[in-house]
Amino acid sequence: MIVRDRPSGLRLFLTMRGSILSRIWKSLAVTTLLAILVTYTDGALLHHKITLTTIPFTLIGLPLAIFLGFRNNSAYDRYWEGRKLWGEVVLRSNNFARQCLSLIGPASLQPPGSTDLRTRMIHRAIAFAHALRHHLRDSDSTAELQHLLEKDEWRLLAKASNKPNFLMNRMGEDLRRCIDDGRIDSCLVAAIDATMSALVSAAASCERIRNTPIPFSYTLLLHRTAYLYCFLLPFGLVDLIGFMTPFVVGIVAYTFFGLDALGDEIEEPFGVSANDLPLDAICRAIEINLRESLGEESSLRSLVPVDYQLT
């Protein structure tokens, strides 16, 4: 995610970090060069004059702009829903740590060298956030989670296809053990179970966003229409505005290509592109908060933007 003040003045046109221009400059350059060529030949192609009026471009341009806006609104809805779901993960993780420490009693007999069940469950909640981040990005979380889990559990985790779900199942087993050992009243179990269910629900909703893209045929139609519109536009403008054709075509192409590419980028909010959600920073915040709740000393610090990008 790009984190910076909104540029003003000349910087508004010179800022490149976070700009969509880096993704569309090739298409924009081709379109502008085509407009220059059309202007130079006065709208002739292979010695044949291509005569177009602005009427078809008006008829096509207005609905194209509306549909691009609709698609970008749909893409942003997915982006914003993803952010709200990760806000839910942060909230429920903090609540889970508080509930484990306040509702589950201490063990009557703690074997030497073993980790307290409450600490183990909170470490698992940290691991859950990291595992969900990797799961949504189709990357392997096994190595990163090794320091948070016991060896036997970590080996089992390495074999699991859905690691967040595996960790929640292990939490359920430990919660059942607390009931059997009398460390928590059965009436209070419902509170912790509700928090765990909310975490599972948030993870499932994130998977729904990741696995259900905007229909390809709809996206393809907009891609093709935007490109055909911008490639043909010089022929409709050259007789009206002459040498200004490349400038006007460049501005129109930047707008249409930019909206198209921006919709593609924010449609999948869990990736690692410049404008995607900062899942690394969110998971780091969860780990810092939960370790502090346990009273653990840690050298971890909140992530800060690097070159205006927060990952």
Image (cartoon, rainbow, N blue to C red):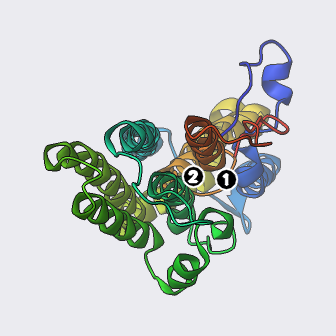
Q: Position of residue 32 (x, y in %)?
A: 76, 48
User: Which residue appears at 15% of the width and 50% of the height?
Assistant: 186
Q: Which of disc 1 and disc 2 is earlier in sequence?
A: 2
Relative side of 78 to 33, left or right: left
Q: Position of residue 144 (x, y in %)?
A: 68, 66
> In the rendered structure, are the residues bearing label 2 and label 1 in contact, judged by CB atoms less than 8 Å apart?
yes
Return the mark for residue 265.
2
Q: Residue at label 1?
A: 273
Return the mark for residue 114.
none
Relative side of 60 to 53, left or right: left
Report, in whole angstroms, how far the alpha carbon at label 2 lies from the one at label 1.
7 Å
User: Can residue 212 be seen in this snapshot?
Assistant: no
Q: Quick one: which residue is furthest to the left in this view?
A: 187
Q: Name which residue type carries label 2.
A: Glu
Q: Quick one: which residue is furthest to the top in this view?
A: 9
User: Can residue 186 be seen in this snapshot?
Assistant: yes
Q: Nearer the viewer, residue 302 or 225?
A: 302
Front: mark 2 or 1: 1
User: Which residue appears at 24% of the width and 55% of the height?
Assistant: 182
State the SS at label 2.
Answer: helix
Height in image: 92 above or below 151? above
State the SS at label 1.
Answer: loop
Q: Position of residue 71 (x, y in %)?
A: 39, 46
Classify 10 Å Cα crowding around label 1: few (below 14), some (14-19), many (20 and above). Answer: some
Q: Nearer the viewer, residue 302 or 179?
A: 179
Height in image: 168 above or below 58? below
User: Which residue appears at 54% of the width and 55% of the height?
Assistant: 123
Relative side of 253 to 75, left or right: right
